[in-house]
Structure formats: C-alpha cells, structure tokens
Image (tube, rainbow, N blue to C red):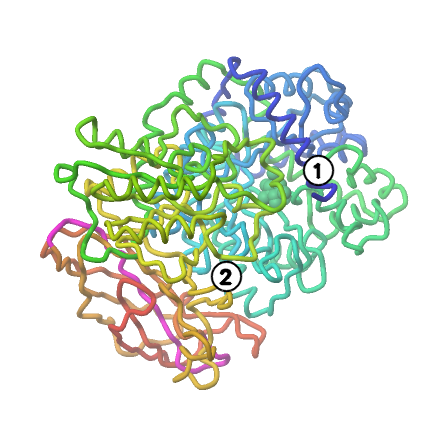
Amino acid sequence: MNARQTLKCAILLGAAAIATAHVTAVKAQTAASSQAPLSDAAVRARANALLAKMTPEEKAGQLTQYFNFLPPGQPNPAVDELTAGRVGSLLFVSDAAEIDRLQRIAVEKTRLKIPVLFGFDVIHGFKTIMPVPIAVAASFDPKVAEDGQRVASSEARAIGLHWTFAPMVDIARDQRWGRIVEGAGEDPYLGSIMAAAQVRGFQGPNIGAPGHIIAGPKHFAGYGAALGGRDYDEVNLSDSELWNVYLPPFKAAVDAGAGNIMSAYMGLNGNPASGNSWLLTDVLRKAWGFKGFVVTDAGAAYDLKTHEYAKDVQDAAVHALSAGVDLEMSVDPSRAAYKTIPEALKTGKLTTKQVDDAVRRVLEAKIRMGLFEKPYVDQAEAARVLADPAHRLVSRQAAERTFVLLRNAGGLLPLDKNGIRSVAVIGPLADSARDTVGPWVFRQDDSETITILAGIKAKLGSGVSVEYAPGVSTPERLYASMFDAMSPVKTVKVDDNAEIARSVAIANKSDVTVLVLGEPQNMIGEGASRASLDLPGHQQQLLEAVLATGKPVIVLLMNARPLDLKEAQPNALMNIWYPGSQGGAAVANVLFGDVAPGGKLPFSWVRSIGQLPLPYSHLTSHQPQNAGKRYSDQPSTPLYPFGYGLSYSTFSFSNLKVSQPSVRLGESVDVTVDVKNTGSRTADEVAQLYIHQRYGSSARPVRELKGFQRITLAPGQTRTVSFTLKPQDLTYWSSAKRAFVQDETTFDLYAGGDSTASLAATFTVGK
Ligand code: BGC
C-alpha cells in the first residue's frame, strides 16, 4: 500500500467511525429552494460581491476540499482549517448529523459564513444500492441509468450532500483495469448515452433542483487506457483515440449540463492530466464551453510534484490552477498544494484574475445549490426519503434489466418453479450481502440487501428444498484493498477440498444447481486491477466438480469483467454483475421466468486474457480476411461479441431501410428496421444499429454503434424501429486533417441484436 492509499485507508476508517457514532442521528437535507433557478447574471453578481470581501487565504480556502476522516471530538486538522475559514468543501462525510455539525461551523463561526459544499462518491446508490454502472450500461436502457441516479441523488441530498463524484465515464477497453465496473464499458456511443442519462438523473432539470445533487463526471481524461490495465499507470493515446473514443462521453456529460468535472490522476501523453491545460482549458472550457468547476482527483494537484512534473508544492499549485483546476481535492492539510496560493499571488506566479475565476466558479455552485438560504439538514425529511420503499422497487427493476444471458443450452432457463423439488445454491458469493451490492458502497443497509440465496428461497417458499453450500472459501487478494477498512468484507473460510466434495453431494441430490461464482467486490474497482481473468480462488475446481455430476447447472457470474471459465460449459450462464440491494429478488424473478433477461454485453467478452484489448470497433487494417486469425494459437475473435445477450425468446431482424440512398453533407438519414419476436414468450430485444465508413480522410472502424433501442415484443409481434443518423453521427476526428470531418463517402449499415449483425444496407454522402 502506498502512502496515499494508507492515508485513504485512515480516512475511510475514520469515516466509518463517524457513521457508527451517528447511525441513529440521521438528519435530512432541507430541499433547496424550489423557486425558479437564478439567472447566470444574478448568480455571478452574488459571487462577485462575496469575492470582493475575501482575503487571499479565504480564496485559497474556497479552492480547497479535504477528506474529513476523524470522528467528532478528536483533534482534526481539516476541522481546524474549516474553523479558520480555509475550507471550501469536504468529502467523505456521509452522516447527516456530522454534515450538519460541520456546516454550522462554516456558517456560524467563520468570518464570511460561506457554507461548505459536501461531496461524496455516490456511484450507484447511497442507501438503496443500484446495480453497478457497468451493469446499468448492459441494460442498454438510459432510463435505468437516469432513474437509478435520481433515487441515489434524492437519498444523498436528503442527508445533506450536494455533489457526487460520478458518473465515471471513462472508456475501458482493457478489462484487467478494475475500474471498468464504474463505467459503461468499451463503446463511446453507449458511454455517451449513459453519461448524459446519469447527469440528468443526478442533477434533475437544473443545478439546485430540489432532491438533486451536482454531477461530477470523471476522470478527465483517458484514465481507462492505463498501460497494461494497471490502475494509475500512464496513458498514451493518439489524438484520434482521444477525440473519437475517450472524450465523447465527457462531451455528452458536459452537454447534459454537468456542473463539475474531476481531473484524472495519471499522466496523459507525457503530461499529468491534473496539470494539463490542453485538456482542462483548451478542450473542456474553450472547445466545449464548460461553465462549471473542476476538481482534482484525490491529492492530484499535490501529486504533480510526485509525478516529477512540478518543482515543489507551490509549483504544483501553479501548474494545476493555471491548467484549469479550480478546486484541489486534498488528502489532508499537510498535503495541500493550494495553501500556497497566497504566496504564489505575492510572487506573481498566479494572477488575482486566475484565482478569482476559480473561486467564482466554486461560489457559483454553492449559490446555485441554494446553500446560502438553506445550509442545514432536515432530519425528518432525511428519514422519510431514506425509508421510501419506492427506491427498492427502482433498484430491483433496474437489476432485472441488466442481466446478460450468455448461454442457455437446451433452454434450461427459465426454471419452472412448480416443476422442481430441490435446488442447490452453491458458491462463496451466493449469500454475501456485501458482494451483492458491489464496490463503491459505504452506507448501504445490509439488512435490506437480498442475496442470491435469499432471493431464491423467498421465491420458492417452503415447498421446495433449497440447500446452500459456499463451495469454497471466499477468494482473497494478494494485496489488501484500500477500501476493506471502510467497507468490511465478510469472508467465508472453509476446507476447500471437503467443501467441494460436500457441494458435489448436494448437487447430486438436487434437481438443479445454481452456482454463484465470480470476483468478490474488492477484486474490482479502484486499485483492483487483475493480471488474470481466471475465476479467483478455487472456484474453477468447484465448477468442474459440480459439472462432472452431469446434473443441470446454471452459473451466475458476479463480475464486471469477462471471466475465463476455460473448457467448462455449464448448461446456462448468466452475467448478473453486482446487482445491488435487491439483487437476489431480481435474480429469482429472472431464473424462474417472471422476467426475461434482455441485457447485452457492453464489452467484448474475450476468450483469454492474451486477447486484451479486443474492441469490436477496430480498424480494418491489413488482410481483413484473416482478422479472426491474428493469433496462431487461438481465434482472435471474442467468445461473445459486444452487444451480445440471449433472451428466453428469439428475434429476427428484416427490412433494413434507409430513407434516401444518398444524402448531402450535413443532412440526416432516417433508418428503419423490423424486429420480430419469433419465440413463444414476451421478451425484450435491443435493436442495435452500426455504421461503417468505406473510405475517407482517415480509415474508420469496421463497425461503430450509432443507435440502439430496447423494446418489448409479444410472441409473433413485429415492430418497426426507427433511428436517425444525424450529421454528427457521421462525423469524426480525422488525424490526417487534424479536425472533425464529415467525408463524402459510402456507409454500410448493419442492424441486429449484437455487433456481428449481418442485415446490411448502404447509403452515400455527397455534396
Ligand atoms: C478516486 C476517485 C474518487 C476519489 C474520492 C479517488 O481515489 O480515483 O474516483 O472520487 O478518490 O473518493
């Protein structure tokens, strides 16, 4: 564990202590003013009036955010700074009473009485936990993303939070990278749709809308392309990849009105992202017109020195602020680069205008959030919001839409709950509440979490025997997770050989076995990259032993990256991700056919780790006829392609039609396709539209997703799905022209249920 991680551990531990100390003292955030939002000019005038009164130290304070990690009553440097009027924002306080107490210090004890902005990682829920973001992407349904984040923001706002460090919109094409769980996977189009939906869910109609919080898309930019998938490692991306793949979800989030952006930790093409003025000023502010405030990732301004980029701490602050970082997220006051701002002003390394512009943006966020009118927490409102049963329904229905059925030999699924007498539920994750909700969860209600075992039991009632065995011990990491302290893991420890033998015996006497395998939640997320895609621990042995019984086996994978099951072929295989608080209920509904699965893979499922990265959207390159044979020892195609997922029904696509065979540059193209449910039950299909540009200023990928719609069809029903390809869908960054271009060219279109769809059409674009 490095120094930053050790410190973060301490932070998390402290936050946990606060949480425990105040568990009964939940207070609520009074909703911000429900009046119409203030005009930009009014907000600016108020911010300027405050700015005029501020000393350089107070300005530097407004630009500083600290983790607050110590329980009340203990000596606390962050609270000392707060009391001295030198803190603009705090993070990692997630208890209503503590938020209220700290806010009263800012508002009642400091000279200018400027309230604190409270931020937190509300990634996929606060108390009611939604499926992890990669799962939500697999729903191919932006409403799932928007509704989930609306619920999350209502809970967070009620307890006094104002801002989330989410959504994470980093594209991830190397699935060794643990943070793939926080994003939407490999595709910029899907990533952009999900990014915008989450911003809408978090923020509502405007910044400051009651029950909503500020969204902070992160990590700007390129973080997902870490070398070797190793978290925090450097990133080297061509301008084509940046503009066409990694930046679009950020642009979509900015266009959706995100009030904040978080700068990334790592170096991008040789320059740390948090000191990168090309990213933070030229792209974000000048090209995209971003008007909100920028925060660094934790300690990333101070880290400009660690990165061997800045000469000293003051130089780090100058680099970060000059590049476009407004607020420094600081690990603690002993490592705060922005404390040196007053000195940098004196020596002329920073100008008053630079500092004032940054402070104004932070103050404007506070004004828009209504903090000056209603800084405190309303306890009754918090209790009401956190207990709202509607939130659980949103979580369960979201989970049901995210599962991806990868295999269903002989139509084993759905199971007939009236036809079976006994079910074996086996696996170390099958009854783990903590793993069911997934990573980036700190304030969940475990008693509300439904594990897979609990969900199956509840569904079947007492008439069916459900026997459970963990099967093997919970797999453990080689290096401890920095989050384990804050978010304790309950592990199962058994004698693996004996337990496998017991599991085989249980499977043998059961009608069907549900094996819940995968990665414990601390094997995915920040600082949780893996150098292997194997099932961790002894789960592969368990799987093979249970399969050897010859009895029907359903494998449910709890994961966020493809896992390599080797030669093992369970009858049914379904990816359930980390399904959230209601995960077990959702799984049971899908297993027993009350709901048909309709999720699709948001990444290519590789055959083995050696294939990584393997995006579906790659260039044609040399010898395309051999594209599937680029290795001599195994196919270079994925095991399951991007966009893939089975259903309990079957679908056919026909009549792919383009409104006009040729259009002019700048014109839109309407596309329609008929989708028919050819099976015998009502189910969902995701109609997907891909384009391929045949020639142009630069070579373009073999396929690019440019439209999708998830629809429900009754047996025999046909629906015509319409898409509009706008000029911007046919425009891309050409590295040859060093500009966005729309070419005169011919496009192939493909429509179907995954990225290998064969139904094709063409159109041309001319002058
Ligand atoms: C992560 C961010 C997170 C921040 C605050 C950092 O280590 O990279 O994604 O928002 O910590 O918890």
Locate the C terminus and report the quarter of the image it occupies: bottom left
Does 102 sit above or below residue 695?
above
Name the residue tied to disc 1.
6
In the image, 634 versus 644, the foreground residue is: 634
Please name the amino acid that badge 2 sits on: Arg
The magenta segment is: 680-700
Check residue 686 for magenta coloring.
yes
In the image, 514 versus 176, the foreground residue is: 514
Counting from the top left corner in percent of width and height, residue 625 is at 39, 84
- Identity of the residue drawn at 74% across and 22% down: 76
Q: Please, what secondary structure does the residue beneath circle 2 have? A: loop
Q: Quadrant of residue 592?
A: top left
Counting from the top left corner in percent of width and height, residue 518 is at 43, 47
Asked if marks 2 and 1 touch (Cβ < 8 Å), the reply is no
- Identity of the residue drawn at 34% across and 47% down: 556
Counting from the top left corner in percent of width and height, residue 483 is at 59, 37
In the image, 240 versus 764, the foreground residue is: 240
Task: Sort mark 1 into few (<14), some (14-19) or many (20+) by Cα contacts within 10 Å.
Answer: few
